Each structure stands twice: as C-alpha cells, then as structure tokens.
Image (tube, grey):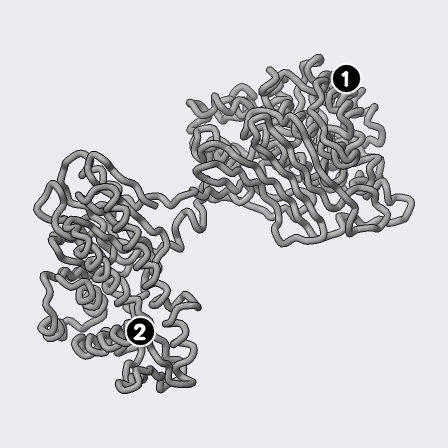
Amino acid sequence: MTELGRRDFFKQLSVIGGGGLLLSSLPWLEGFATDKQKELKGERAKIAIIGTGSRGLYHINNLLAMPNADIVALCDIYPPHLEEAGVLCPKAKKYTDYHEVLASPDIEGVLIACPLHEHAPITIAALNAGKHVFCEKSMARTLEQCKAMYDTYKSTGKVLYIGQQRLFDAKYIKALEKVHQGGIGEVVGIRNFWFRNNDWRRPVPEPALERQINWRLYKEYSGGLMTELATHQLQIGSWALKSIPDYVMGSGDLAFWKDGRDVYDNVNVIYHYESGVKMTFESIISNKRYGMDEQILGHTGTLELAQGKYYPEEPKPAPGIQQLINQIEHKAFDNISIAGPSWVPETAADVQGEYIVKNVKTHDGSNTTGAVGDGSVELVSSFCDSVITGKPIPVLVEEAYYSSVLALLGLQAMEEHRIIEFPEEYKIPYLNHA
Amino acid sequence: MVAFYESSNLLHGSLPYIMGTRLDALILNVGEAEAKAIWERMSGEIIRLDGLLNKFDPESELSFINRQAYETPVPVCDELWNILLDCELYHKLSLGYFDITLKDFRQIYLDKEEHTLRFLEEGIQLDLGGYAKGYALEKIRDILQREKCFQALINFGNSSILGLGTHPYGENWSIGIPNPYILQENLGTMLLKNTAMSTSGNMPTHTKHILDPHTGLYSAKRRVVSVSSANAIEAEILSTTLMVADKENIPEILSHFQINQYLLFDLP
C-alpha cells in the first residue's frame, strides 16, 4: 500500500497524521498510522507466500505494489498455482514443502492462504520457527486448533495477523465508532446474511484433484459457509457488543447443491448474548436476491455495514422548526430562514440512508477471492509494518479468535441439533472475560 | 410524531411523509390535551386529503380519474368537484399559467349537470401539486379556528407556511427566504400574522420541476418567488404562476388576486 493510499485511509477516518483521540479507541491501527512510518526507515518485510491459489494470488498482486514488502519465497503443493505465482514474482524462491520455507533464515514473515485445515499446523510451526505470520481467516478447522494457535501466538510473542479485513475497512471502523458513541442508541439486534447463487465450485482439471481444489465443500478440510463466510460477519458481534454470546443454536442442511459435497448449503444460526440481544447468521447459496450485509439494529438507528449506510429510526426534525421551538422555549423572538421550494423527503436520510464515510466502496459478497476496497490491502500492509517492527498488534487476533470460535460453535450446534453453551475452556482473556 | 413542551404550552406535531413532503405543526396555548386533540384531527384530515389528491397514490380518487377519464366520463365527489371548479377559475385568473393538466386545460371537460369529468385528449393527467398544500392549509385553519386555537405555525415542507396569530414573543411570525444558491444568504423576509405564504423556485439539487403550460417546457430560471396572502390557496397558486409567468404579465395577473406581498428574485 502506498503512502498516499494510507493517507486516504486515515482521511476517511478523519484522523490527521494518525494521532489524536480517535486512535486510542482503535489500538490495532496505531502501528499503521502514517506518523509511525518513519520508524520503518524504508525497510521491506521479507515475505513468503504459502498457498498460491486464488486468495494467495490476490495478496501477491497487492503486495507487489507495497513499498514495505518484498516477496522472497512462494510455496504450494499444486504445481500450476506455484507456476502462476512464479510468473508474478520471478525472483522469489519456489518451494513445495512449507517446512523448508520455515527453515530458511532469509524469511521474516509468512502469509498463509491455503485450505482451512492446514491453517493451524502451518501457523503454529511458523510461529515456533520464529516467523511472523499472516494467516487467512477462519483461524482454524477446529476449536482445539484455534486455541492452540492463540496460545502459540501468546507464548512466542511473534506477530500474528488473521485475515479479518473488516477491522481495516474505513466504513466498518466509522460505523462501529458510531455504535460505541451511542449513535444508534442501545444495540438491540445484529443480523448477518450472505446469499449467493452458485455452486461454489472451482474447475477441476482431473477428478483425482476434486477434494484438493474444492476443499471448501468437504468437512474434512472446511466448515463450509460457517468458516468461509460467517467468520467475517460474526466478528461484528464482538466488535459491537464487546462481549461474547452465552449460547448458540442453529439449523443447517445440504438442501440444494447435492453434488457429492458434505458441507451445508443452507444455514441459520442464532447467537444469544447475556443481555438478551441476539445475533443471527443466515446463508443460502441457491438464491442471491439479498446479497450480503451485516446490520446492527439500535433503538434509535440502524447500520447497514456492508452498504456503509446509516438510517435514523425517526426522521431528523426539520432544522428551522427545531430552531423556532428553541426560541419559544427561551422566550425569544427571531426570524427563522426556512422558506423555499418544497423539501423532497425521498432524499431524506431515513429513507435512502446516509453514507457513513465519503467515497464508500461496497460489494455484494459475490466475489469469492477478494473485493476492492474491503480492507484487505490495508490489513496486509499493516502486517508488513509489523514484520519490520516485530511488534504484535492488539485486538486483531483476539477478535479473529472469537469470530472463528463462534463460527465453529454454530456449526457444532447445527451438526448436533442442540443448544451449545459457550465452553469455558475456549474463553480467552478478552472482552467480558478479561 | 408529537412532542409537548410544557413550559411553553407548545405542541409540535409532524408527519414525515405527506403530500410529497413533510408537515410540521406548532400549536400554542391551548393546553396539552386540547393541543393533542387538535393535532389528531388535523393530521387525520391531511391524511384524508392526501388519499384524495395525491396522484402518486394509485388508490387516490385523483389516480382513478387519471386512469379512467379519457375512456369514459368519471363522476367526481362533491369536494373534488369544487376543487376542479376552483382550479378552472384560477386557470383563467392566472392567464393560463396555473394549469392542473400541466399542458392544456382545454382538454378537460367538466359536465356541470352530471358533475363528471372527461379528458378530451389521450395522455391528459391532473396534477394538484400546485394547489393541494394551499387547500390543506385552509382546511387546517378551519380546524384550528373551530377549536379556538389562535396561535399556530403550520409548515408544509418549507414551501407552504401558515402563520396563525403571532409568535408568542413577537408581533408576527418572521419567515426568512434563504438563497438556495448561496449558503447563509437571506433573500428577504415575510412577516405572517393570520396569513399564509408559499414559495416556489429551482434549487441547485432540484432544478426544472416547474412546467410552463404555455411552452410545455420546465422552468430553468434561477428564480425564487414568495407570495403571502390571507388565503393559502391563492398564495400557493400565485407562487407557481409567478415562477413561470412573463414579467410583463405579472401586474395583470396580480390584479385578479388579493395578496399581501410578493417577493420575486431572479438570481445571477
């Protein structure tokens, strides 16, 4: 990410130079602030990419444009993907065994974009090998693995990033700031949904590679919609409510795409918080009408996070009339300058909503590798900074941990047809369990 | 939405979406219970009128006429009949600038025996946008007077305002006219005391929405017109008329109306 891009990002957040009050409530952005750039002295983080499939290529393309990154190694067990990445990074050394990558002293950080079931073993091995790690979300395939990753992160003191890019998306940051400042009143509900209409398959050159390429469709490697889609959205619960749910229930089925896969294509999950507030996640991939969004419902307003929009519950009072009422209340007489052509309510905030940040970039959730302007670039750029400084950033891993755990608990509730209490052994010192 | 301000004996009622805009009412010095009863009656009446006169509501009587009147003569209820006669009169008095067909008033036929309406040309539609808010303000005035409320300010989306009595701490209601093109600049002020005012104009965000029935073209002028009159309907009709009228016709048009004041600004 260029210096200019970084300035634009903070401009959207209205933080000049990166200092000031606002950043203290966004601690994970402190290292990313423009005034910290001097500490980096123009250094480049030496990065290895482990997993050069579609998401890996997306990151490679972004990293190539960043002044603080140097891709020195590529690793994949699937030769066509490794070749493709090699064309983009001709100087990078190519590996097929990640253990060799981790043994190389020239590599400072690894970016892991391989199938979910490999996240934990590779991340843990990398951290233990003294590498800084960026691992795509979800954190891991099982609760045990998530916890083991978290524990290793804490014990090694190395940098760990998980690909929860919403924490680096200006429209999300501003929206959540509004929530925390009481801008939508008391939060009374959170609704997450992700609808697509496609089989979620990648083309397979030969049948033997089906499970390797379409790993998302098999339980052995993936939690399906929960780990691949819900994890992004479930983070909103922790972020907005600053707490974790006490129990989870849900229902999931393979209802439409009965093509040999064994993950659900139709899920509905409810996360219950102690306050009585609920967060839902619904995903169907055989109808795309409603797209993707996260909606925070407050008693005075609503936020549509993916749209970057805010809707007040009641229309704002007409300013002139409010001014007149205030005059009368203060026993004063004055002019009110209101006369004009008819005010057209169709443009009013409560109907169309108002944008939370200027130049908002939105996407409909249909892209399966990465969308433009969703925070991914900022997140990876910040990772490179952290690799250079060697300092872990606060909040991100904890947020990612809980969103991954929530996704897996939802999956468990659906698979076991029962209400799952949040297990004590998976609570970490964060939020209401500090 | 209703709020009552005890210490000022002031009720503020509002309807956020009505007649294509928003209604705010300040009702003063009648006590909370009475003010609320007046607001209930007033808002009920406005909602009823919207259902009669709103051409965008497919259920309104006006929409029914717009769909049917070219095919066959449509019987019209008494209230709407009287409105149509009123509009016919104002069409003449405004030298044809006020035209609820927005096109050619001669293409509607009012059968004065049967009280039916027929369109003589296909595609003719009635639009009461330049009339309804004034009519509604007169209905509101009737309700306020019947309920012995003598102090109120009623604002229909800033374009149609009725000031009954005076501001509690002034000798009138003083309403400024901001320059839509220059922030914070005031073009003029109208003082209302048992009078209504209506304002028409183009805005930077809302250009070309007033049609000149003589040319069939939307006005692109950077003009703002405010008219105050004891009669809210006449204020309403004249503000739209003066928006499109040629300046040399204005004295003749005005000679047909009883108005308090008009302010016309042609902005650079």
Which numbered circle lies on residue B79? Answer: none
Please give the chain letter of the residue carrying mark 2.
B
Q: Chain of mark 1?
A: A
Looking at the image, is A272 positioned above or below residue A24?
below
Task: Identify residue for label 2.
Answer: B217
Residue at the image point whose x is 14% and y is 57% from the top: B195
Tell me the quarter of the picture where residue A67 sits.
top right
Residues at circles 1 and 2 in contact by the CB criterion of under 8 Å: no
Residue A132, relative to residue A221: is it above or below?
above
Quadrant assignment for the N terminus of chain A: top right
Q: Nearer the viewer, residue A303 or B1?
A: B1
Q: Position of residue A100 (x, y in %)?
A: 83, 24
Q: With A311 as the anchor, is B77 left or right in this view?
A: left
Q: Left of A291 or right of it: where is B160?
A: left
Across and down, in percent, residue A118 comes to 80, 30
Q: Amino acid at mark 1?
A: Ala
Q: Is residue A115 visible?
A: no
Asked whether the residues under marks 1 and 2 belong to the same chain, the reply is no
Give the residue drawn at x 23%, y 70%: B244
Q: Specify whether B35 is left or right of A105.
A: left
| Three-letter amino acid code at the position of disc 2 | Leu
Q: Secondary structure at mark 2?
A: strand
| Residue B158, quarter of picture | bottom left
Disc 1 versus disc 2: nearer the observer: 2
- Look at mark 1 in the image and give the residue it sits on: A129
